[in-house]
Image (tube, rainbow, N blue to C red):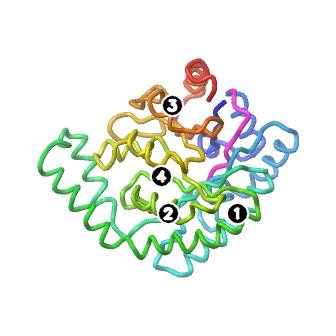
Amino acid sequence: MPAFSTCWNNSRHTDGEAMIDEIVELGFTSIELSHGMTVAKLPGIRKAFAAGSFTCIGVHNYFPSPVEVMIDAPDAYEFTSHRPGDRQRAMDMTRRTLEIAAEFRAKYLVLHMGSVPMKSSKWTKPLTAMVTDGQRDTPEFAAKRIDFIRKREKVAPLYYQRAIAALETLAELAREAGVILAIESRSRFEDMPTEREMLALQEHFKDHPHVGYWHDFGHVQLKHNLGLLDHGEWLSRISPHIIGAHVHDVQWPARDHRVPFTGELDYAALLPHFPHGCPLTWELSPTRKADEIREALQVWKHLFPAR
């Protein structure tokens, strides 16, 4: 049975219990507490949890949101930042989130590890625009993509090491909390880690049971659509490290967080790479309608009764 993320309805509620109730009414009882949550919603969430209304499958950093950040911004503080104060704030907020995750008996904590200092407006966005315009198979697109990869590879080592250093500390805190750190695949090539870096990161922590890989179907499909990877081939390589996934669909070429079965993803071909029983958490845009989600859930149960 899939789980469901509060990112879908968090912005529509001021009371945490009402937010949980709306998700339960969709047909989900296993819930991920996602980023962007104000601390004011915690009492209602705790009330619903104590009443047994839901099971907390996982938490997404940062939870609750930093009080000084007025918008939903999970990347407001990055472990890779050149500002020491931002790196420290990222660590402090993650420690707090781990405490919350332990309180709600969550299995995992989804982490964004940061980025390299390359503007998306210069790289990922223009490449996406070229794909949208039908230029993915042109020499111009290939040249820009290769230039992008080369430049990122050149600047990446410092930021990768910062991410590893942060995880060295956080992994021990996760062990104490009984929570697995779920390092998420990201949608932009500027983000940390890339797939090559993810494999290195997972190898670095291969003997640590509290660090694993969190697959995001939509994020990886966006990179697939830019020709930066092959979705199925990537899953075959990273599968030994998978602990779960965010499930959503993609409408070509770059509109993600759609309801499953409304886009281009072939779940039947991709799901065999996932261990049975691992969390599959639907992470949907707030614009998606409740009836659409209910219908998709029924289709999912029919097609994948063991998932």
Residue 85 percent across, percent down from the top left: 56, 80
Pointer 3 or 1: first along the chain = 1
The residue type indicated by label 2 comes to Leu
| For residue 155, above or below residue 279 | below
**Tag in front: 3 or 2:** 2
Q: Name the mark on residue 259.
A: 3
Pointer 1 or 4: first along the chain = 1
Q: Name the mark on residue 201.
A: 2
Measure the C-alpha gap from mark 1 to mark 2. Answer: 16 Å
Seen at 50% across and 74% down, the residue is 162
Specify the segment rendered in magenta.
27-35
Measure the C-alpha gap from mark 3 to mark 1. Answer: 31 Å
Mark 3: secondary structure: loop
Residue 201 percent across, percent down from the top left: 50, 63
Give the left or right position of residue 61, taking residue 134 as reference.
Answer: right
Give the left or right position of residue 261, taking residue 15 as reference.
Answer: left
Pointer 4 or 2: first along the chain = 4
Residue 72 percent across, percent down from the top left: 56, 55
- Residue lying at the far bottom in this picture: please name it: 84
Give the left or right position of residue 186, taking residue 296 as reference.
Answer: left
**Tag in front: 4 or 2:** 2
Please tell me how many numbered marks the rendered image carries.
4
The residue identified by callout 1 is: 174
Decide which of 34, 116 is in the foreground and name it: 116
Q: Quadrant of residue 12?
A: top right
In the rendered image, residue 143 lying in the magenta stretch gets the answer no
Measure the C-alpha gap from mark 3 to mark 4. Answer: 19 Å
The residue type indicated by label 1 comes to Ala
